[in-house]
Image (cartoon, rainbow, N blue to C red):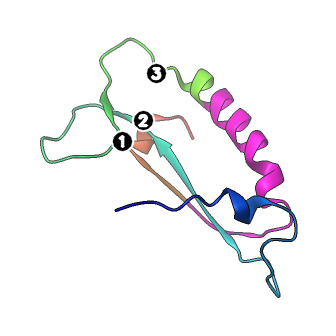
């Protein structure tokens, strides 16, 4: 399948909508205690003494900050946290 170049839609005024559609946000936490043999997701077996949790959260926040201009003014409708095993992260 050929994915069309969508850069032209990102130019101001190129996409006319009566209202901005809501966003659904997916946050991927890629670590598991054990990699399941059937799993095709980007996940990695964690075997170290400590998850790089703070570094990952810092990178995630930086990524969200960089994306903010593309989604400004839109309402976040839902947030899904998946992985991996999200429960490995602290609450």
Task: Name the element at disc 1.
Answer: loop
Q: Main secondary structure of the magenta part?
A: helix
- Magenta residues (range): 57-79
Q: Please, what secondary structure does the residue beneath circle 2 have?
A: helix
Query: Could you tell me which residue is drawn at 87 percent across and 64 percent down?
Result: 12
Identify residue for label 3: 51
Q: Which mark is residue 88?
A: 2
Q: Position of residue 67 (x, y in %)?
A: 74, 47
Look at the picture and state if 58 lies above or below 29.
above
Within 10 Å of disc 2 (Cα), the crowding (few <14, some 14-19, many 20+) is some
Q: Residue 23: image x %, image y %?
A: 67, 68
**Callout 3–callout 1 Cβ contact below 8 Å:** no
Q: Report the Cα–Cα distance between label 3 and label 2.
A: 8 Å
- At a point 54% along the width and 26% down the height, the residue shown is 53
> Label 1 belongs to which residue?
84
Is residue 85 left or right of 73 when viewed as pictured? Answer: left
Residue that appears at 84% across and 60% down? 72
**Tag 3–tag 2 contact (CB < 8 Å):** yes
Which quadrant, please, contains the C terminus?
Answer: top right
Q: Quadrant of the N terminus?
A: bottom left
Residue 37 coordinates in the image, percent (x, y): 12, 41
The residue depicted at 39 percent of the width and 45 percent of the height is 83
Q: Is residue 33 magenta?
A: no
Disc on the earlier residue, 3 or 2:
3
Q: Residues within 10 Å of mark 3 (few under 14, many from 20)?
A: few
Front disc: 3 or 1: 1
Label 1 CA crowd tier, 10 Å (few <14, some 14–19, many 20+): many
Q: State the residue in front, 91 or 85.
A: 85
């Amino acid at each position: 399948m050929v994915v069309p170049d969508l850069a032209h839609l990102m130019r101001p005024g190129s996409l006319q909508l009566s209202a901005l559609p809501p966003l659904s946000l997916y946050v991927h936490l890629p670590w598991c205690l054990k990699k399941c043999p059937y799993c095709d997701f980007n996940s990695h077996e964690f075997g170290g003494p400590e998850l790089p949790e703070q570094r990952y959260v810092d990178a995630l926040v930086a990524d969200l900050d960089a994306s903010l201009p593309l989604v400004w003014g839109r309402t976040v409708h839902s947030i899904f946290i998946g992985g991996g095993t999200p429960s490995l992260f602290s609450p």
